[in-house]
Image (spheres, rainbow, N blue to C red):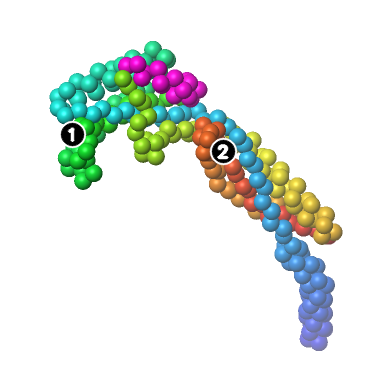
Amino acid sequence: MNNKNFWSGFCIMLGLLAVAISIPSAVRTARGFDRIVTVKGLCEKEVTANQVIWPVVYKVGGNALEDIYSNVTLKNRIIIDWLTSSGIPESEITIAAPKIEDTRTNQYGDNRTYRYIVTSIITVCTDQVELVRHLQSEQFSLLDRDIAIGTGNQWEYPTQYSYTLLNDIKPQMIEEATHNARKAAEKFAADSDSRLGKIRSASQGQFSVTDRDSNTPYIKVVRVVTTVNYMLKD
């Protein structure tokens, strides 16, 4: 019986000894998991818009709605012919219902020459961005047909440029952003007399597409920031 108690006590002692030996190692391992550096990697790329929505806006004044309607119909046809002959397919052109303003109902309209002011909007939606930019520079050629394009409020009817090929450049940009994040982490590790370990976690971040500036809205800046957590080693 005493012999059995001896061996039982001996086994318990060995177990406690093993636990005592493993505690420092476990503490060091736990502390190692706490040694993390969080870095961000930025990647920016300039691209050219591949789609444009161009509202072709003009106004017509008159006192008889029937005459105005005939005038608008004629001018719409002239503009569409000009666009299609320049290379814009008619399938990429839409005509919105005209906006009619009765100046007699306007408190500031007493001295106006015409009772009715009609705004006509013809919208071009195409991927021929360079062609649209060229036509915008040539739109004054319609003045000899008594059509002044662009007389609408440019804040209300802006030309909209967009970039829809984001999936084509995402992999390369994520790779570059991750590479930049690693460079920052390596610098941090070197400055702290540590070595860079494995990635503990990472977040791709959101892609954003913005105008480069207000003067060239057809040039876009694509931006992504990745966040990476790296382990640090002694």
At a point 69% along the width and 53% down the height, the residue shown is 39
Residue 111 seen in the current view: yes
At a point 74% along the width and 50% down the height, the residue shown is 184
Q: Nearer the viewer, mark 1 or mark 2?
A: 1
Which quadrant of the structure image shows residue 33? Answer: bottom right
Q: Position of residue 144 (x, y in %)?
A: 35, 16
Which sits in the foreground, 142 or 108? Answer: 108
Q: Residue furthest bottom?
A: 2
In the picture of the structure, the residue carrying the numbered disc 1 is 115
Contact, CB < 8 Å: mark 1 with mark 2?
no
At a point 46% along the width and 23% down the height, the residue shown is 137
| Direction from residue 97 to residue 36 in the image, left or right | right
Q: Which mark is residue 212?
A: 2
Q: Residue furthest top?
A: 85
Q: Position of residue 23 (x, y in %)?
A: 78, 72
Q: Position of residue 110 (x, y in %)?
A: 19, 41
Tell me, yes or no, whether the highlighted magenta stretch contains residue 26: no
How many numbered marks does the figure carry? 2
Q: Which residues are magenta?
A: 128-145
At a point 71% along the width and 45% down the height, the residue shown is 180
Within 10 Å of the Cα at label 1, are there few (<14), some (14-19), or many (20+) other Cα atoms?
Answer: some
The kind of secondary structure element at disc 2 is loop
Amino acid carrying mark 1 in the image: Arg
Which quadrant of the structure image shows residue 81? Answer: top left
Residue 89 seen in the current view: no
Please name the predominant secondary structure of the magenta segment in the image.
Answer: helix
Q: Quadrant of the C terminus?
A: bottom right
Tell me, yes or no, whether the highlighted magenta stretch contains residue 138: yes
Amino acid carrying mark 2 in the image: Arg
* Figure check: 199 above or below 124: below
Q: Quadrant of the N terminus?
A: bottom right
| Direction from residue 91 to residue 162 in the image, left or right | right
